[in-house]
Image (cartoon, rainbow, N blue to C red):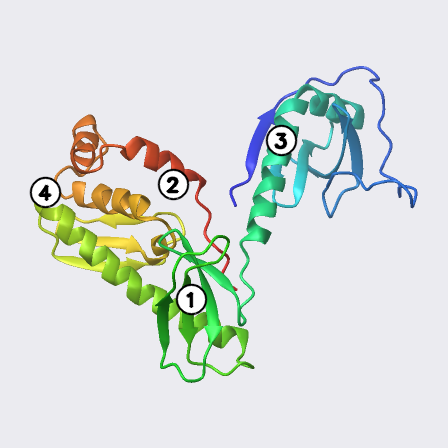
């Protein structure tokens, strides 16, 4: 995850309140809500106790970094502790907001982690799919049932024994998802390419960590296979986006008008895509 960063310069100030190093809380007290695993100091920001990592170095500014582990502060060797605490107080709102965002990201990450076993669930085209270990099945076969309240209608029967290793289950499901991704993407490209007046010469699946798709001037399209987890409007937006680049290799107003011609609500879908979270495959 990308850490949030902020840097500022503070002139040394005279004798603000010194904040003592963190001490072990009483057994009955709740632990501080934001604690860096390498914390050596703590500060109270707007009522929240924040235990942070402090690093000294050859730099001219006080720098704040909020990452998955918590708050890290980098400071010049000549800046006093009281000045660091004063700088933290001046940016309390920003620090707390970023810590809350990181806490929420971690919570969502843990909630989306898949335990690969019989009964595991993963999203496919925006719907939950339940894994059923079925030694009678060949490979992986999707079954569809009548929709019932609170019951997933899709099950993927995986041809493995009930004591199969989690990595085996994950690999079979991943292979099935990649096959479905190619099928769905090819179908949507056939739908949109003629409407956009472009010709796609080659489609390939991507596992890139920084982008959902890419397009080349030679007519090649690459789409991240894990888009297949999302509902069709999201897939359609990404497919149309990359195909539109075969007409406009930029992000100009003309480009977005090309996208809009086949996905009129692209702005809404693009906003939703920024909030989408992939299940964790481990």
Distance between the Cα atoms at labels 2 and 4? 23 Å
Instruction: Give above or below for 135 relative to 65.
Output: below
Neighbour tally class for label 3: few under 14, some 14-19, many 20 plus, Cα within 10 Å: many
Q: For the residue labelled by badge 4, is the local secondary structure a helix, a strand or a loop? A: helix
- Earlier along the polypeptide chain: callout 3 or callout 2? 3
Residue 124 is left or right of residue 85, and the answer is left
Distance between the Cα atoms at labels 2 and 1? 25 Å
Residue 61 visible to an observer of this rendering: no
Residue linked to disc 1: 155
Residue at 50% across, 53% down: 150
Residue linked to disc 3: 63
Instruction: Give above or below for 87 relative to 157.
Output: above
- Earlier along the polypeptide chain: callout 4 or callout 1? 1
Neighbour tally class for label 2: few under 14, some 14-19, many 20 plus, Cα within 10 Å: some
Residue at 53% across, 72% down: 118
Residue 233 is left or right of residue 173, and the answer is left
Distance between the Cα atoms at labels 4 and 1? 35 Å
Percent position of residue 98, x then y? 60, 33
Q: Quadrant of residue 65?
A: top right
Distance between the Cα atoms at labels 3 and 2? 31 Å
Residue linked to disc 2: 273
């Amino acid at each position: 995850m990308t850490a949030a960063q902020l840097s500022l310069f503070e002139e040394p100030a005279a004798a603000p309140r010194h904040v003592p190093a963190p001490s072990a809380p009483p057994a009955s007290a709740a632990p501080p809500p934001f604690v860096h695993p390498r914390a050596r100091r703590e500060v109270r920001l707007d009522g929240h106790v924040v235990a942070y990592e402090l690093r000294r170095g050859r730099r001219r500014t006080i720098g704040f970094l909020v990452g998955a582990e918590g708050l890290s502060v980098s400071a010049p060797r000549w800046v006093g502790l009281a000045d660091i605490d004063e700088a933290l107080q001046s940016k309390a709102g920003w620090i707390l907001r970023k810590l809350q965002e990181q806490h929420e990201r971690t919570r969502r990450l843990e909630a989306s982690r898949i335990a690969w076993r019989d009964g595991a669930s993963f999203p496919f085209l925006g719907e939950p799919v339940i894994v059923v270990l079925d030694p009678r099945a060949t490979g992986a076969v999707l079954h569809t049932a009548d929709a019932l309240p609170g019951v997933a209608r899709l099950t993927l029967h995986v041809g493995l024994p009930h004591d199969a290793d989690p990595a085996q289950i994950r690999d079979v499901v991943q292979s099935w998802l990649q096959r479905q991704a190619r099928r769905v993407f090819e179908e949507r490209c056939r739908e949109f390419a003629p409407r956009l007046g472009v010709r796609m010469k080659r489609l390939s699946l991507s596992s890139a960590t920084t982008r959902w798709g890419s397009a080349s001037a030679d007519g090649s399209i690459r789409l991240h296979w894990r888009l297949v987890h999302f509902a069709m409007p999201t897939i359609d937006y990404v497919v149309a986006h990359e195909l539109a680049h075969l007409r406009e290799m930029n992000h100009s107003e003309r480009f977005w008008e090309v996208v809009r011609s086949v996905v009129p609500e692209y702005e809404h879908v693009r906003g939703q895509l920024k909030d989408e979270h992939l299940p964790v495959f481990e």
